[in-house]
Each structure stands twice: as C-alpha cells, then as structure tokens.
Image (tube, rainbow, N blue to C red):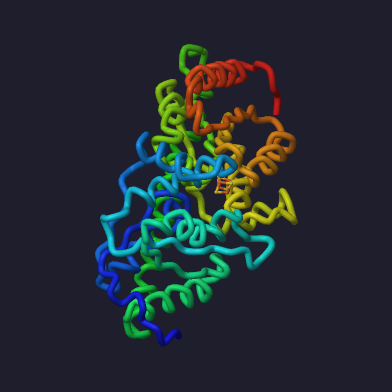
Amino acid sequence: MPQVTDWADVRVVGIPRALLFYRFGVLWTTFFEGLGRTVVVSDPTDKAIADEGERLSVDECCLASKVFVGHVASLAGRCDAVFVPCYPTSDHRSGFCTKFQSATDLVRSTFRDQHLRVISCEVRNARKMKDVRRAFEELGCRMGVAPRDARAAFKAAWEAQEAHDKTAADGQLRIMRTLDDRRRAAERAAAAGNGDVRQPLGILVVAHPYITHDPYLSGAVTDALADMGATVVYADAVDHEKAYKKSFEFSDTMPWLINRELIGAILMLEDHIDGIVLISAFPCGPDSMTDDAIMRCIQGKPILNLMIDAQSGTAGVETRVESFVDILRFQQKGGYVRG
Ligand code: SF4
C-alpha cells in the first residue's frame, strides 16, 4: 500500500457522467461515499457539454471521448478533484479500448493550464475482483484512509455494483419473458383466425453503455423505436459474465471486453428478438471492426447500423428507424428474410 497520502485533502470528488461511468459508476460513487467523501456527478449530457468537449478535443477523438472531456470541463470549480481511472489492457481477451487507458493522462494534459486536480487508480483487469480491489484500496490509502476502512468501502462498492447489474439483468429477463408471452398469444390468435392481432416487436439495441444510456447521444433512436411500438431490449443489460463467455462462440481473438459482452448478448438473445440496431460513435475503432463482423456473421436478423457523430448527431435517425421498423413488420408477415 502506498505511504503517500497526497489526496487526503480531497473532500469532494467529481465524477464525469460519461464513458465507463455507465458501467462502473455505482462502484465508484459507493466507494467514495464509503470513504466519507461527497460525490458530485456531472449533469446529463447537453449541447453545451458536447460542444465544450468538441472544442477541447482533437478531431480524431471519437464522439464518446469528446463528450467525456466536456463532462470533465463541467466539473471544474464544483469539486476538489475529478476522478478519472485508468483501465489498461492486461489480458488480450478482455481489454479495453485505448481511450480508457489514456483517459487519466488525456485529462491531465487537456486541463493542465486550469490546474484541474485529477485523482486516479489503475485497474489492471476489470474482470478480476482482486485487481479491482487492489486499485481502489491503494486509492483509498492515498486519500488518507486506513487500509481496513478502504477495504470495507470497496467491499460495499463491489456488492452495490453487482446488485445494480443483477437488477438490470433481471428486469430485462422479465421484459423478454413478457415479449415471448405476447408473441405466443399473437400466434394463437392468428391460428384461431384473428388476423388483426399485431405481433409484438422486440428490438435489441447494441452499443457501448455510454452511448445507449446517454439520452443526448441515442435518445432519438430509442424514443423513435418506442414511439413505433417496439419493445427495446439492451445488449448491455444482460449477465456480463454469461455474455462474455458466450462471445467465444463468435470469436476467440476479439480483444475488447465490452464488445465481447455485446456480441455475447446478441447470441444469448437473438432467438427472442426481431431485429438489431447497432449504434456506434464516430470514429470508433473497436466498433468499426466488431459491427462489421456482426453484420456479416449474424444471420437471419435484420440489422440497422447507425453511426452518430458530433456534426450530424442523430439527425435523420427517425426516418431510418421508421423504415427499419416497417421492414421488420413486413418480415413478421413472411417478408424478405427467412432465418
Ligand atoms: S470504444 Fe469506441 S466509442 Fe468507446 S471510447 Fe473507444 S473509440 Fe470511443
């Protein structure tokens, strides 16, 4: 454990509501609160945050990382330090996009003139609880907390994240069961000669959680689907461990953990849904490879591939979603693609 306690005076911790906050945010906030700190999470993304992130970032950065920088900027003056962890790739079957490895350095460099204070920890392998615990215990000690108390805060944080993920996965399972029940009821009605009963439509949205669950980035897509009567199912709201293991049926070599979980979720859910919407933030390196592989290898399910960027945002999305849903309705009546 580090002897330095150079972050002991940090009483208010700022956390950007972006990137891995949507995956590990419960763990992060519970941990700091367990250390007796006040946590300030940045406000939901809006145009001002997105524009500021765009202004502060180089053009080559993906939209998601630009938005992240905008969130960091919005925390300046509202906290003693901003928490920006580092998630490097230590295991070539469950690594992260390089943005998560470089985030700490990127923020320190971008905001060096403003002297924005950044606290961090390095999580070597996010799938190994011991690795995560070591990183957060070291962070707690640097914040002046006794090792035993840091360990207790981490335990509570880990359990809170697990409970949160389980609630999301269980909730989605219930939605899937309801969808299956409605489908069977519609089939029975059709078999009994009642052709007016419309089949339910289940659409699986496949995107990184910081895209899917940020209403500014993808709300237009999910709203349009819901407005057209579809049941929206999320690829990131399944049991992560099961999805990760399932992904090896698709690829032995894919290096990115979240893309693995998303593909594993497709394999777990494809028999229960009618179509897939892929949403990617321009220019995402991992998605450019995995989305192409999904389009080529997932057979029998219509797929809509959407790319959102800082310039066009989700403009035109409603029309594309509308056309896609029309195709799916046609498919339900025996249309184009037979799986
Ligand atoms: S995975 Fe893609 S969208 Fe996410 S941070 Fe990396 S490049 Fe950006």
Q: Is the residue 14 above or below the residue 174 in the image? A: below
- At 41% from the left and 38% from the top, the residue drawn is 50
Picture coordinates of residue 167, whole percent (x, y): 39, 53
Q: Quadrant of residue 279?
A: top right
Please identify the quadrant where the N terminus is shown: bottom left
Examine the rendered structure and indicate whether residue 136 appears above or below residue 253: below
Q: At 32% across and 53% down in the image, what residue appears?
A: 75
Work out whether 61 lies above or below 35.
above
Looking at the rendered image, the quarter that the C terminus falls into is top right
Give the residue at the far front of this rendering. Answer: 113
Residue 159 location, x and y as percent? Answer: 39, 67
Between 63 and 22, the one nearer to me in the picture? 63
* Residue 191 visible within the image: no
Q: Is residue 26 left or right of residue 65?
A: left
Give residue 226's position: percent from left, percent from top. 42, 27
Q: Quick check: 192 above or below 40?
A: above
Answer left or right for 166 relative to 287. left
129 on left or right of 74: right
Q: How many marks?
A: 0
Q: Is residue 306 visible?
A: yes
Residue closest to the eye, 137 or 282 = 282
Residue drawn at (45%, 34%) of the image: 218
Question: Who is closer to the viewer here, 60 or 62?
Answer: 60
Q: Position of residue 182 (x, y in %)?
A: 46, 30
